[in-house]
Image: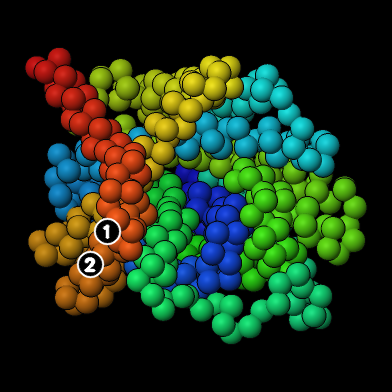
Amino acid sequence: MERKYLSVSSLVMMIFLGVFGFGNIANNFKEIGMSSATMLIVGILLYFLPLCLIMAEFGAYAKDRTSGIYSWIEIGLGKKMAYLAIWSYFVANIFYLPTLATRVPTYLSYGIYGDSHINNLEMAGLSAIGLVISLIIGIKFEKSIGSLSKPVGYISLLTVIVFLVAGLYLHFTGQSATHLTVSSFKIDLASKSSIAGALGSFSWILFAFGGGEVVGPYVNKVKNPERDFLKGLLLSSVLIGTLYVLGVIALSAFGTQADFSKVSLVNAVLAGFKFMGDKIGLGIWFVKLMGIAYSLITLVALMLWGSSLAAGVFSEAPEGTFPEWLTKKDDKNGILKNALIFQTILAFLFIALTTFGGKAAGELYYRVYDMSTMALIIPYFCLGISYIAFRRKGHKSPFQIHKSNRLSICAGVIVVVMTLIALIFAGYNFSKPLAGQLSTIKLYYGGLIMFMLIGVAIKFFSGKKKK
């Protein structure tokens, strides 16, 4: 039987589902207005594009590895640093899975009622169903996730294009809610406080580009990874970057920054389409249609993230790194069944805690969630350093950013610098007194240290038990 390979278009749609978030557009716009478009352009050129090129070079070099980002960091920095990086990656994303799961019933509510009408019991029950579906697909049909991502990715792309066309039309015909000028896109750098604010905003915008590594575990499923993996990453970086920038412009046509500031983080996606429907005279059916579409899109994204997270963290972890049962693969198809079940249980427990645990339990969870935020930066920081070490050691990949080590290393340096900016200024404002920021600093950086210490303890006791 001839082996089925992932096409370039499948890779692009997988990355698109993993990275692109309409909520990122709406939430960045409501926070900093049109200057978010300018910051997104800077983020694309100085962070996302170099990061994709680095992943392409690593992917071509380690095309037979199955863990993606873990193996890329391990090649340059060794197993210990790779473990710390992948542990922080797990910490950040294990809290993202329940977030995705709860968005499925929220969007489904829009699909049924045209608005968010869902109680706690319905939220928990439908989220659990979404998690179980994701688990079954991950265990039984893991090889089909790439194929499934392609048509659903096209649906997601179509919804965005519809939004863009309508928004740009309103701008060109003078009917937009926001009047655009050249100064609208200007980043305010006139004072110390505005510079600090811009750095903080830019740091959080970089988080919008996380997720391209979801295709890392699928490199060995690409027929010609030296060529096609590169094409997939480059095409997706251009596509996502373009849609992010145009999305901000289109969004401003349907509502002002003040309009979107009244919308919650979760509802920002469908609120954008609701504003669009009201602006151009579409009925409630349009919002319902978008609600159904985003329910499906989010469910498939949940499947993709769950399978990719398990493969990235546990598939190549050395013995004694994690408890042995977590890294055990199915004898027939090599699926990490136990890891997938473990992730699903954790995600549902988090949902149950916030839904039925009362106010105190909910506050505790969201505090821990905030504490895990900075953990997302560590893997990309380590990936940049690993690439610098990789090129300095003289490794030769079938694809190279540039034959010159010096020029290629610049890409790694740029990624490291950008991640450092995000790590520092996402939680620290240098224009304000330090004493007034201690609670935020403790939350973000104290939380990061706490989670890293937990990871060290897990590795220590797992290794001790193995010996």
Which residue is rendered at x = 15% and y = 49% of the image?
Answer: 77
* Mark 1 vs 2, N-terminal side: 2
| Residue 413 badge | 2
Circle count: 2
Compared across the picture, whether 59 is left or right of 77 comes to right
**Can residue 214 be seen in this snapshot?**
yes
Comparing 205 with 137, the one in front is 205
**Can residue 398 be seen in this snapshot?**
no
Hey, which quadrant is residue 467 in on the image? top left
At mark 1, the secondary structure is helix
Which residue is rendered at x = 60% and y = 32% of the image?
Answer: 102
Which residue is rendered at x = 32% and y = 22% of the image?
Answer: 326
Report how far apart the C-alphas of labels 1 and 2 lie in the structure. 10 Å
At mark 2, the secondary structure is helix
Looking at the image, the residue that sits furthest to the bottom is 182
* Amino acid type, mark 1: Leu
Residue 123 percent location from the top left of the image: 66, 26
Tell me whether the residue at label 1 lies in contact with that at label 2, contact meaning CB atoms closer than 8 angstroms: no
| Residue 34 badge | none
Residue 98 percent location from the top left of the image: 52, 31
Determine which residue is flagged by label 1: 420
The answer to whether 460 is drawn above or below residue 165 in the figure is: above
Q: Circle 1: is it few (<14), some (14-19), or many (20+) Cα within 10 Å?
A: some
